[in-house]
Every structure is written in structure tokens, then in C-alpha cells.
Amino acid sequence: MPHFKRLKAISGKLAVISGVLLFPLTVAAEEVWTLESSVQQVVKISPRILAADAEIDARKGALSQAGAWPNPTIEIGGSEALGLEDGKGGSDLTSFSVSQPIPLGRLIYQRKQATAELQVANHKRFYQQLLQENLASRRFHDLQLTEAGLNLAKEQLSFANRYQKGKKDSDRLVRYLSKLDKKRLNIIREIAKQNVASAEGAYSEALSNFRVALNLPQDSSSKIAPLEAVQIPKALLELLDLQNESHAAIAAAKHNKNAAEASVSLARNKRFPDPSLTLYREKDFLNGQRQNFTGVMVNFTVPIWDFNNGNISRAKADANRAGHELEALERDLQATLRQTHLHLGHVIEQAEHYRSRILGPAKDIFTLTQKSFATGEVKILSLVDANDTYFEARKRYLELLYESWVEAADLRLAAGLSLKTDAKTIIGE
């Protein structure tokens, strides 16, 4: 019996030790979503990117087909003519021919057009990735803002609860307040409760959107990194150079123009359909006996009535349209980049101003006002004013941080930079 008690005690200690050892491992295993990991998840599961991958495969098939020669045509003929000529009767195979169309120059233009279309699909796929990254960034930053807003609302409610009579940790001065002052404190508390309820709703909605965007279960843990300040972006001229060099939408439009120009050459080439070379062998009744002979023919179409002018004109118009669309796209993206870069700089500057000139002093005033109110040096209105100023300043600062991150995501999209694959980012070194 003593041995049994000793073993039981040892096993209990081992259970406690193992629990202590396993607990940190469980906590460490909890995934914290960052902007980068969120983007990677969305890119990995996005149906739109998978559809773009399928389009690339289709363009590869079209390129492979563009270089294929047309198939030959085989003709076999038979009749009773020879039997009637020599009086032997019966039917015989009298002719055999092989015709091979010869594509003169057409395959070159077809391959050029198909190659350009494949490049269009490749760049459109990358641009679709940029769009999905932008969407993931917005969902991530929405969740960051609403989570920070919920924590702020709870903190404000916790402060309001300090001045409620009967609370265990309430301020001792509450009992000496007038009825009017107590009503003011109750209003602060009720407003704080409403803010918490509103913040919880906004957070739940943002969390649901985040999980949907990342294709996560609705009951999954979605802990995220907190909002932080955005650094100064790269110089505008550098971003404009990057946009001009590698923006996926611009590159796709350029290759689309190349494909349209190749279609013009292909339409001109089709004025003359492919000539055909035919080798044939026939059997006939010559000089009183059956004889075999071989021949060669060349078939070609003479464009007398149809010069394919309509298709050529249409191809030229498509090429002109592709050129104008490229020019318009370059202008629009350049204007968007300039505007977003300017707005981001303003928001970053405003956030820093709020942090140093408003948020810091508001916090100091709030702390000093609480102390002064506890000693009876200031009235309740001063405390209410300090409370409103401080929490509104914090709320506005969070909104400015959120706006700066959203602008940063839009700036990446306008510059054509991927957070997932590019070593260069818009954030300064």
C-alpha cells in the first residue's frame, strides 16, 4: 500500500511536469497571421489564379498547334472502265493520290501571334495575383483595425466601470459625487458599452471576411499581428521606373498589341490560301493494254473575287485599338501611382503628427486629470473631457495607421509589385 501511494504521487508529479512542458508547445503552435502569410495563403487557394493558370495551359496548347502543318489528303478511286475496255469485266482500283497543303509563311505569323497570346496570359496571371494580394491585404488590415478598435472600446469601458458605485475596484471618490455627476459617469459607461457592442459586430464581420478570403474554417483561430506604423515609401521616380519596366498589366497590354499586329500579317498572308502539291498514280488502258503511270500536280487559289480585305481591315483596327488601350492604361496607372504615393505620404505624415503632437499629450492630460479628480482638484467635466479627447485621439490614430496600410497596398498594385514574389517592395530600406 505505501508503494502504491508513492507511485501515485510520482505519477501525479510527472503529469504536472508534462503539462507544464506541453503547455508552451501548445501556445507556440498557435499561428499568428501576418500580412505576408495572409497573402501567400490567398494566392495559393485563389480560384481566379487557378483559372489564370488554366488559361496559360490553353495558350501553350494553341502555341503548339500554331506550328503544326496541315494533314495530307489521300484519295483512292476505282471503276469498271478497264474491264469494259479489254472485255474482261469486273472493277479495278484505277487511281491513288496524296495531296499535301504547303503553308508558305503562314506558320511564322501563327506562331508569332500564339507566342504573344501566351505572354499575355502569363502577365495577366501575375496581375491577377496582384489583385488577390491587394484583396488579402485589405481583409488583413480590416481585421487589424477592428480588433484594435474592439480592444480600445473594452479599455474605455473598463475605465468607465471604475467610477461606478458598488464596483470592487471603483474609485473611492464616487460616493461623494453629486447626482448630476453620477449621471454623467453613467452616460460615459453606457456610451462605452455601446461602443464595445458596435466594435464586436465590426470585428466579427471583418473576421468572417478574413476567413472567407483565406478559405479558413469559420471556427478557426485567427490571431493576427497588431497595427504598426508604415515606413516612408520609395521615391516616386523609382516607383514609376519599376512600373514602366515590369507592371504586369502594362506588359500584358504590350503583348496583346504584338498579337494584334501579328494577326494583321496573318490576315494578309491568307489572301493566298495554302497551295497544295499532289502526287498521283493511275491505271488506264493504253495501246491495247493496261498500263500504270505517275503524275504530279500543284493546286493554288487565284484571289480574283476575294482578297480578304475585310479581315485585314478588321485586324488593323484591332491592332490600333490595342495600341490606344496600351497608351490609356499607361496613363491611368501612372496617374494612380502618383496620386496614391502622394496620399500615402500625407497619411504617414498625419499619423506621425497625431502620435507625437496629439496622442502623447492627450495621454498625459488624461493621466493627470484622473489623479487630480481622485484628489478633488478638478470637476467631473474635466474628467469627461479628458476621457473623450484621449480615446478619440487613439481611435483616430488607429484609423490613420489603417489608411496608410491600405494606401501602401494600393501603391504596390499601382506599381506592379508583388509582396509575395518580388524582392523589391515599396517600403524604403
Image (tube, rainbow, N blue to C red):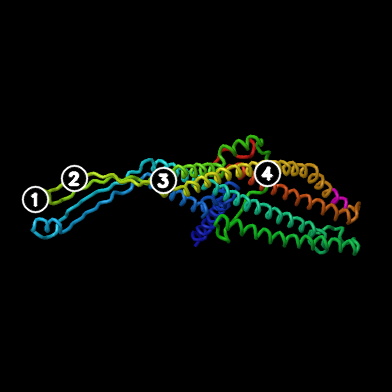
Other-residue count near label 1 (Cα within 10 Å), few / some / many at <14 / 14–19 / ≥20: few
The secondary structure type at the circle numbered 3 is: loop
> Residue 341: x and y, percent?
68, 41
Whether tag 4 and tag 1 are in contact, CB under 8 A, the answer is no
How far apart marks 4 and 2 lie (CA) works out to 76 Å
How far apart marks 1 and 2 lie (CA) works out to 19 Å
Residue at label 4? Answer: 340
| Residue 123 visible somewhere in the drawing | no
The secondary structure type at the circle numbered 1 is: loop
Residue at label 2? Answer: 294
Q: In front: mark 4 or mark 2?
A: 2
Amino acid, disc 1:
Gly
Q: In front: mark 1 or mark 2?
A: 1
The secondary structure type at the circle numbered 2 is: strand
Residue at label 3? Answer: 271
Q: Earlier in the sequence, mark 1 or mark 2?
A: 1
Q: Is residue 370 magenta?
A: yes
Q: Earlier in the sequence, mark 3 or mark 4?
A: 3
- Residue placed at 17% from the left, 53% from the top? 94
Q: Earlier in the sequence, mark 4 or mark 1?
A: 1
